[in-house]
Image (cartoon, rainbow, N blue to C red):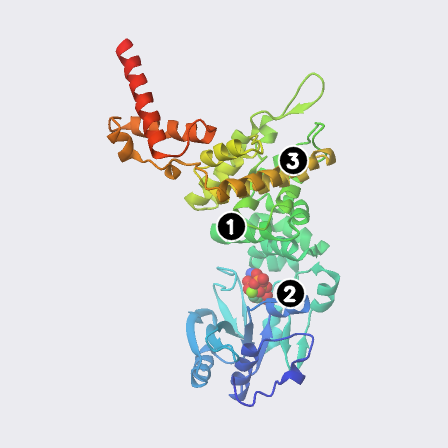
Amino acid sequence: MIEGNPYNEATMKGTVDIPRYGLDLLVVLERAGFEAWVVGGFVRDALLGRSSHDVDIATNAPWTEVQRVSVAAGFSTHETGTAHGTLTVIVPDADDPQTKYGIEVTTFRTDGAYDDARHPTQVEFVRTIEEDLARRDFTMNALAYHPQRGLLDPFDGLSDIEGGLIRMVGDPHERMAEDALRILRACRFASQLGFRIDDATFQAMLERKHLLAQVSVERVTSELDGLLLGAHVHDALMKCADVLSFVLPELLAMKECPQVTPYHIYDVLEHTAWAVQHTPPERLTRWAALFHDMGKPAAAFFSSDGVEHFYGHAAVSMVIARGIMDRLLMSNRFKDRALTLVKRHDEVIEPDARSVKRALRRLGGDVDLFRKLCAIKRADALSQAPQCAPRAALADELEQVLEEVLATEEAFTVRDLVIDGEDVMAAGVPEGPAVGDALARALDAVIDGRKKNERDELLGFIALADAQSDTVRSDI
Ligand code: ATP
Ligand code: MG
């Protein structure tokens, strides 16, 4: 802790509670004669009562000075973004020096286009905090706080926070043109905070969405991730679909696809938005929920009784999802698992041990993926017509059966069998694909309860099956 830090408990009692490590760094900078403020997302979140460890400081000190005074105070630093005036200072927790926090300290600046969420391609350093705040994206993010000087709020960010409004600082058209990422940030904040987007800001988002073509894929993906993980994702997807369509054109066919069936009350887009909302905020599950019905517009047809059907839509959803994930540079593992969830979202699994073990086997023994599949099934049921909601209970039952299967250590993959390939070959099965086939048959027998997962029983079963297939061979 910095000795004699004047920002004691009493002065800290403002609207914004700055953690001790943040105050310590403010003191170090200001004792050296510089001006420093806590800025941006931390202040916004604190005013919203959302806790965060992500303290950002803006100062009139050049980064070299920030480094000099920080090191003199015993803090280490990382030269992460010094080209843009940002230095990361590592400050220990006063009560627990083993715990350290990275604080990004940025020299007052203005900027043009950003090449990632924080680092503009060209920056110009400025003298005042007010000029620095003017370059920030939304009024709720253009706030600075100081434990003695209080809240600096030149754009009425506090009243927008209170009113739940996302409003661009300055002219929204110009600001979006300067950095189109802000378009997606608005959608993402709407999802995270549940705020409404101001009309003029939203109109500019629509009119400028073509500029998203200039934003790097990585940043698009990261904002979409944030949006999907938001607590208000349904509302954000519905509100922003026509903006997001520039990076996710697949949303439009969903929006235009009604579901004229007794099971649905929403079109495909709104059903999907609810399904995403009803899943836990976890990246893979939420993306898979977004994808699960994307094939419906292509699979749709009306039977002569006027009812709509979507037979086989999951296969088309997979084609579309693969295209999106390739485009958004998702990892191969992520793609494989998401496609499995999409493929299997509609598959019937009975809530009994045998069916659950078979389903686990189809998932390659991936228990976590089974749980995610249950989450999607539950969310899917909750997002259909009200009379379908009770089907969500089936997902609960499946998870309960899963726990029982896991607790009793029942086999559901070949790896769980007490015998392996060596044993099978020792029992006379020739090396090659026949070994895998024999193990697969043994697993079938165990899952079905025809055989116990015991060595002698399984080896006897394999030897018998092998002898029978020999007989078949010699008969040919
Ligand atoms: P979170 O960290 O929760 O995503 P945040 O508001 O802290 O939200 P950061 O990306 O951490 O967002 O950026 C910190 C601050 O920098 C923002 O609050 C905002 O003032 C400013 N900022 C970030 N990205 C931009 C941008 N593209 N255009 C203008 N200002 C930005
Ligand atoms: Mg932040």
Q: Position of residue 458 (x, y in %)?
A: 35, 30
Occupied quadrant, residue 444: top left
Q: Which one is in front in this view, the residue at disc 3 or the one at disc 2?
A: 2
Occupied quadrant, residue 157: bottom right
Identify residue type, mark 1.
Thr
What residue is rendered at 54% in x and 82% in y?
Answer: 24
Identify residue type, mark 3.
Val
Q: Which residue is mark 2?
A: 50
Q: Which residue is mark 3?
A: 268
Mark 2 CB in 8 Å range of ligand 1? no
Marks 1 and 3, Cα distance to the nearest angstrom? 22 Å
Marks 2 and 1, Cα distance to the nearest angstrom? 24 Å
**Ligand 1 found in image quarter:** bottom right
What residue is rendered at 46% in x and 37% in y?
Answer: 363
Residue 407 drawn above or below residue 29: above
Relative to 373, is 268 on the left or the right?
right
Relative to 468, is 20 on the left or the right?
right
Q: Which residue is mark 1?
A: 221
Residue 253 drawn above or below residue 173: above
Can you say which quadrant of the picture contains the C terminus? top left
Comparing 345 with 331, the one in front is: 345
Q: Position of residue 437 (x, y in %)?
A: 34, 27
Identify residue type, mark 2.
Arg
Residue 434 drawn above or below residue 150: above
